[in-house]
Amino acid sequence: MTARPRRLPGDLSPVDRVKRMIRVDQAGEFGAVRIYEGQLAILGRSPSAPVIRHMAEQERQHLAAFNELAAERRIRPTALMPLWHAAGFALGATTALLGERAAMACTVAVEEVIDQHYAGQIEQLGDDEPELKRAFEGFREEEMEHRQTGLDHGALDAPAFDALTAVVKTGSRLAIWLSERI
């Protein structure tokens, strides 16, 4: 029999840790949908629109899965959903106004943060939640496909790529941190 790691004061219980994961991932997928909606509001007739629509549809499927998990497990959404509603759309529209390559750079930046985020969650789950772990692994794979799509569609040629992606990554990390707690 292997000993379970001891919890320290302030550590979340395994149940609360999973609730936090689902809450933050639901918020993240909602934000991703809103980013793509903002991009499509500007680029809806551009050559990249079908690609953006495809990624948006996958994010909607992820969001639907998290909505279902939250309902099944009676997990409240983050109180910041109204903020993510506006901020996600604004980020998508703003990057799209900078051009198709900037919109793709936004995707690359967000997906790099999400890849790390899902990887950490998958590791934390271990063998405790095999179905949830498989779902996270599938979502992570699609998020990495989105990153590659962004790269394939000129993200690296976006104006001020390094600065743009640094800002988007910082905002994404902050959104994760806040959504886990509020």
Image: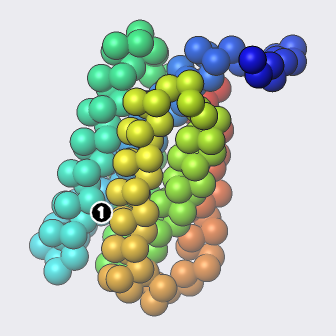
Quarter of the view holding residue 65: top left
Front position in the image: 154 or 17: 17
- Left or right: residue 128 versus residue 31 is right
- Quarter of the picture containing the C terminus is top right
Front position in the image: 7 or 55: 7
Q: Residue at position x 56%, y 41% from top?
A: 122
- Left or right: residue 43 versus residue 149 is left
Mark 1 residue element: helix
Q: Residue at position x 36%, y 30% from top?
A: 66
Residue 24: x and y in percent read 52, 33
Front position in the image: 106 or 83: 106
Q: How is the image coloured?
A: rainbow
Decide if residue 49 is in sight here.
yes
Q: Is residue 107 above or below residue 170?
A: below
Q: Is residue 164 above or below residue 30?
A: below
Q: Is residue 79 above or below residue 155?
A: above
Q: Residue furthest bottom?
A: 157
Residue 79: x and y in percent read 50, 22
Residue 29: x and y in percent read 39, 42
- Left or right: residue 147 versus residue 100 is right
- Quarter of the picture containing the N terminus is top right
Front position in the image: 95 or 72: 72
Quarter of the view holding residue 16: top right
The amino acid type of the residue labelled 1 equals: Gln
